[in-house]
Image: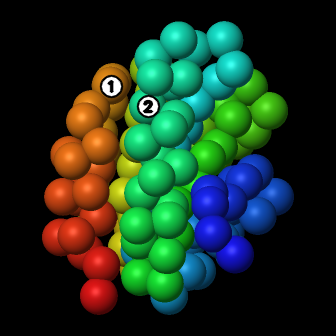
Amino acid sequence: MSGTIQITDTNFQSEVLESDQPVLVDFWAAWCGPCRIIGPSIEELADQFEGTAKIGKLNVDENPQASSGFGIHSIPAVLLFKDGKVVETLVGVQSKERYAAALQSVAA
């Protein structure tokens, strides 16, 4: 399966915290213009890193638990998890290359 996975409050533990691969989570909302700007880059990264990392999107309006649990106050916010811990936080619009570099630093 290629493409991003949908992360929710319900599956956050299993998909992100218990993942044996690094996980990049894009915290976004439908009304957020900058979130829509980075959306295509996030999708492309999901294909590029298939097999070495998981790429997921979490809608902050529909999943307030995970958002507040990680102190998400500004979106887009992209958090990179490895072994269940946040290893990098990127807030605001970043280049696809910046996200890719972060992933490459932790991907096997």
Quadrant position of residue 60: top right
Quadrant assignment for the C terminus: bottom left
Q: Secondary structure at mark 1?
A: loop
Residue at (69% x, 54% y) in the render = 7
Residue topped by disc 2 = 38
Residue 90 position by quadrant: top left
Q: Residue at x 75, y 38 (%)?
A: 63
Mark number displayed over residue 93: 1
Q: Position of residue 58 (x, y in %)?
A: 65, 43
Q: Is 83 placed left or right of 104 in the picture?
A: right
Q: Is residue 86 above or below residue 43?
A: below
65, above or below 75, in the image: below
User: Disc 2 residue type?
Assistant: Ile
| Residue type at numbered disc 1 | Val
- Residue nearest the viewer, comparing 93 with 63: 93
Across and down, in percent, residue 84 comes to 46, 73
